[in-house]
């Protein structure tokens, strides 16, 4: 099996697993911090999509444009940038929760 084919299959399987974990009720939680920050602490059930990859990452989740998406990072700056990107793509239910502390309090 070619490496690219294997990588494609693994990506599809991971996307399916992430999608099944990501949805807590009607809210999709996305942590836009770097993977090492996410590993230290995160909202249970959140998906880690670094803010610079938010457009491709959310597209891979196959969310509806009106899905409720809660974004957070360390302070709210990166989640604000990610929200602007998703707003520009036509997503209407995006909420910048702010920092991790605020997200954990939700």
Image (cartoon, rainbow, N blue to C red):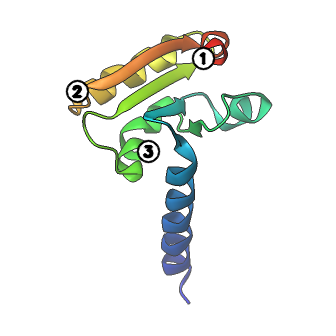
Q: How many marks?
A: 3
Disc 3 to disc 2, C-alpha distance = 15 Å
The residue beneath circle 3 is: 57
Helix, strand or loop at label 1? It is helix
Q: Is residue 84 left or right of residue 2?
A: left
Q: Are marks 2 and 1 in contact (CB under 8 Å)?
A: no
Disc number for residue 86: none
> Of discs 2 and 1, which sits in the foreground?
1
The picture places residue 70, in percent across and down from the top left corner, at: 46, 24
User: Would residue 86 appear left or right of 58 to someone viewing this image?
Assistant: left
Residue 36 locus on image (x, y percent)? 73, 35
Check disc 1 and report the residue beneath it.
103
Vertical order, 1 against 29 (above or below): below
Which residue is drawn at the image coordinates 20% and 31% (left, top)?
A: 90
Secondary structure under the numbered disc 2 in the rendered image:
helix
Q: Quadrant of the N terminus?
A: bottom right
Q: Nearer the viewer, residue 44 or 85?
A: 44
Crowd around label 2: few <14 · some 14–19 · many ≥20 (10 Å): few
Q: Residues within 10 Å of mark 1 (few under 14, many from 20)?
A: some
Q: Is residue 69 left or right of residue 7?
A: left
Nearest to N terminus: mark 3 or mark 2 = 3
- Whichever of callouts 2 and 1 sits on the residue coming sooner in the sequence is 2
Seen from the viewer's position, the closer of residues 39 and 104 is 104
Element class at badge 3: helix
Please tell me whether mark 3 or mark 1 is closer to you in this view: 1
> In 3D space, how far apart are the residues under numbered discs 3 and 1 (Cα atoms)?
20 Å
* Residue behind mark 2: 88
């Amino acid at each position: 099996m070619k490496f690219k084919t294997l990588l494609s299959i693994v990506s599809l399987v991971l996307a399916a697993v992430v999608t099944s974990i990501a949805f807590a009720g009607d809210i999709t939680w996305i942590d836009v911090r770097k993977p090492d920050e996410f590993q230290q602490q995160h909202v249970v059930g959140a998906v880690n999509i670094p803010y610079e990859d938010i457009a491709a990452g959310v597209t891979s989740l196959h969310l509806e444009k009106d899905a409720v998406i809660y974004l957070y990072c360390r302070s709210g700056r990166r989640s604000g940038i990610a929200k602007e990107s998703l707003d520009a793509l036509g997503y209407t239910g995006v909420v910048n929760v702010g920092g991790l502390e605020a997200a954990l309090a939700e």
